[in-house]
Image (spheres, rainbow, N blue to C red):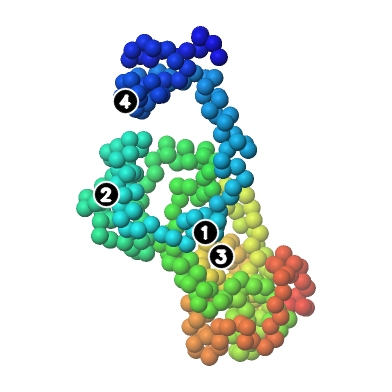
Amino acid sequence: MNDTELIECLLCGVKRYALGKHISSVHHITTKLYKEQFPQAKTQTDTVAKKFSDVQKGEKNGMFGIHRFGEKNPFYGKQHTLETRKKLSNSLLKSEKLPRGKKHWIYGKGEKSSFYGKDPRIYFKNGKSWFYGHKHKQEVIDKLKKDPRCITKGFLGHHLSSYNKEKLSKLAGERIKKNLYTVHGKYKNIFFDSSYECIFLKICDYLNLNIVRAYHLRCKYKIEDGSYHWYYPDFLLNDLNIVIEIKGFLSKYDNLKKEEFLKQYPDYKYYIIMLDDLKEMCNIYKVSMDIKTYEGVIFSNDGKKNYKYKTEKENTGL
């Protein structure tokens, strides 16, 4: 170090390599107050700052090689008391490093807050979050699309319809309650691609209906971006010329698929059977919805792509 690196105290003109001790002992103020008064001023030279940094690096650091995760953490299994939580909350409010006023993330704390005396989770239980009834501005949407942390770019700016929300909620609830998870397999030599399809096959078996997979009745449909896609219906009731599609909930293109199918195959009737329809049929014909209890069921990991190309002879009647 040399004299050219010395820093001048802007209060008295004294030059030092580091002014921290001088400011506190001579001027009786903290370094923080000094920096507030002279925002551009330095309190130590670059050489001194580097020395302090080097002392704390690598093996010289007192915490080097010490891990305090899980049970090794001294606070493991403990909780802050209510008094401590209030202190932490108040310290955040007084913090000068956080934005103040309406820009503060906890603005409105206390009786002014809309959550005062309420459990905030009730807003989410009723489908009303803090953002309910609001929409992102276009500039915010564009900014989020460019953000690499955004993982919902494809659905950004879109909303599920209330109908689809209700269907998704019912589907998830039923899967949890009845263990009706998506499975693949055979029921008496006919392939199924979900538990709902297996239930429908069981009902057809009870009614002695001649049913086969309907992949040979494929049709092509066009979506809004101009691209074409193939649609393969689920089942065909041979004696009745009825095509059946089993759905847990309706997706965006289901109605389009139905329209295109009826255009290309006008001699067939087409019906979509939903979960509620399956429940009603099971109640009428006294059929269990627990597919694990069915006789003649063989579960496998073979997906739809494998059994699309099975011959019709393999897929014939029950």
Instruction: Give how far apart the Cα atoms at labels 4 and 2 are.
Output: 33 Å
Horizontal and vertical percent for residue 275? 51, 75
Name the residue nearer the viewer: 167 or 243: 167
Location of residue 14 (image quadrant): top left
Is there any visible trace of residue 170 in the rendered image?
yes
Name the residue nearer the viewer: 212 or 187: 187
Instruction: Give how far apart the Cα atoms at labels 3 and 4 are.
Output: 79 Å
Total marks shown come to: 4
Instruction: Choose the circle earlier in sequence order: 3 or 4.
Output: 4
Residue 29 — which label?
Answer: 4
Q: Residues within 10 Å of mark 2 (few under 14, many from 20)?
A: few
Horizontal and vertical percent for residue 244? 59, 74
Instruction: Choose the circle earlier in sequence order: 1 or 2.
Output: 2
Instruction: Give how far apart the Cα atoms at labels 1 and 4 are.
Output: 67 Å
Q: Residue at x 60, y 68 (%)?
A: 266
Horizontal and vertical percent for residue 214? 67, 72
Residue 289 — which label?
Answer: none
* Residue position for label 1: 252
Residue 258 — which label?
Answer: 3
Instruction: Choose the circle earlier in sequence order: 4 or 2.
Output: 4
Q: Residues within 10 Å of mark 3 (few under 14, many from 20)?
A: some
Q: Which of the two marks, 1 or 3, is nearer to us in this view?
A: 1
Residue 109 — which label?
Answer: 2
Q: Is 75 situated left or right of 53 in this image?
A: left
Horizontal and vertical percent for residue 268? 61, 73
